[in-house]
Amino acid sequence: MITLKYFASLKAIADKEEEHLDIENPITIDQLSDIISETAPKMGAMIREKKVLISVNQEMASVETIIHDGDEVAFLPPFSGGTK
Amino acid sequence: MITLKYFASLKAIADKEEEHLDIENPITIDQLSDIISETAPKMGAMIREKKVLISVNQEMASVETIIHDGDEVAFLPPFSGGTK
Amino acid sequence: MSTTTFSKVRIQLEDFSVTDEIEAMKKVSRNIGGITTFLGTGRELSKGENISKLNFEHYPKMAEKKLEEIREKAIKDYGIIDMSIIHRIGPIDIGENIVLIVAAGEHRKETFVACEWAIAELKRTTPIWKRETTSSGEVWVQDTP
Amino acid sequence: MSTTTFSKVRIQLEDFSVTDEIEAMKKVSRNIGGITTFLGTGRELSKGENISKLNFEHYPKMAEKKLEEIREKAIKDYGIIDMSIIHRIGPIDIGENIVLIVAAGEHRKETFVACEWAIAELKRTTPIWKRETTSSGEVWVQDTP
């Protein structure tokens, strides 16, 4: 099982804050975006179009990152902490 | 009458904090250093050798500055306020 | 002052005291000669719109980890003695404190560089998001750093 | 808080509170988004010698005038909203506050630049002198800025 987390503006787009998925084998982020598209097509498209940052187990991920069972994957809009 | 002020390390060299002098006509800083040398020769030498900063009426002075009756002349060692 | 309250890196709902954070920092070393702090506060105007309220959200654990990485890199790369970083989350009014960076060093130069780097790096790498409430409604701010 | 206590430029015997100075600054404008402060503190070591005590002397009126000039030039040249400058005189222990610069602006960049410029300019132009007490005795510090 993997955990998916959506933050800030992405919560409305995914229509959820968190979800859990069972995966049988390690998957790529591209494959994950296909699964997400089934319930949240706009969110899936944003991932494929690289419009969100992705972290895996709290470290920034790249397109090559492979997701394994037990991982926590988070979708992060551009940060705006601190101040200008 | 003019007022002379000595600050920080210069108080020990001039052996005073403040003194008053009567001057008949405007004088140059060079002429003033001669008068000071009469009672505090080391102080007079430091002024001539430009080892101290001088202010006249709380503004930094140059060698050309002429001192007039009523002026406040201060002798200032290098500043060390603030922190490194 | 418990050590929990004054951990050097914190994300918290409550306000903080700049004086208390500086005094905690001074206890680290008797050789501190300069402390540069940056305090971010809620301002009323953003892109010409009047803001009535701010709200910050973070990714728990990851945000704290990023702040700790910034702190450690600042100490190592800029030769400062220590740094603390505190960011508030939740609702914040105009004029209230949002974020504080405290950089302490022997001399002033390195504390300015480290402090300015840290706030820029926080904005770039730390998963914290801001929602602004204006007369047009609530919006998540997504300005690039 | 009387206006006397919170005049923007002060030379005083008493300690000051960084939090109070920042809060006084925030009252100037609801558009302050960043406040950079520099705090100089008494450090124990100087050129390898242990310092037990510091003592600051100033040229009254001229020192205040120079600080006000620095404040006005910082506001004008760097586009910050306001600045306050406080320097203590008299005896100061290790770890105690010596000098505080508070630079408030809409955004952070200009506040860092103005704050760093102001403390360097203070050291260069303001008639304030430091006496250090070490095991070798008391000496006036005459390091060039």
Image (cartoon, coloured by chain):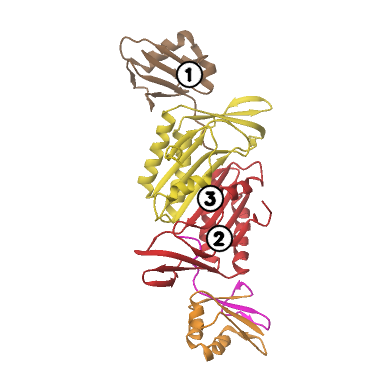
Chain colours: A brown, B orange, C yellow, D red
Name the one closer to the observer, C87 or A63: C87
Residue B81 shown in magenta: yes
Q: Are marks 3 and 2 on the same chain?
A: yes
- 10 Å neighbourhood of mark 1: few (<14), some, or many (≥20)? some
| Label located before the other in sequence (3 or 2) | 3
**Could you say which disc has been placed on residue D87 in the image?**
2
Q: Which residue is mark 1?
A: A46
What residue do we see at 55% from left, 50% from top? D18
Where does the magenta region start and end?
B57-84
Element under label 1?
helix
Residue B78 shown in magenta: yes
Position of residue B64 measured from the top left corner of the image (x, y, whole percent): 59, 80
Q: Which residue is mark 3?
A: D37
Q: Nearer the viewer, mark 1 or mark 3?
A: 3
Name the one closer to the observer, A66 or D34: D34
What residue do we see at 44% from left, 27% from top? C60
Q: Amino acid at mark 3?
A: Thr
C22 up-or-down from C144: above or below: below
- Residue D69 in sight here: yes
Q: Choose top left, top right, bottom left or bottom right for residue B4.
A: bottom right
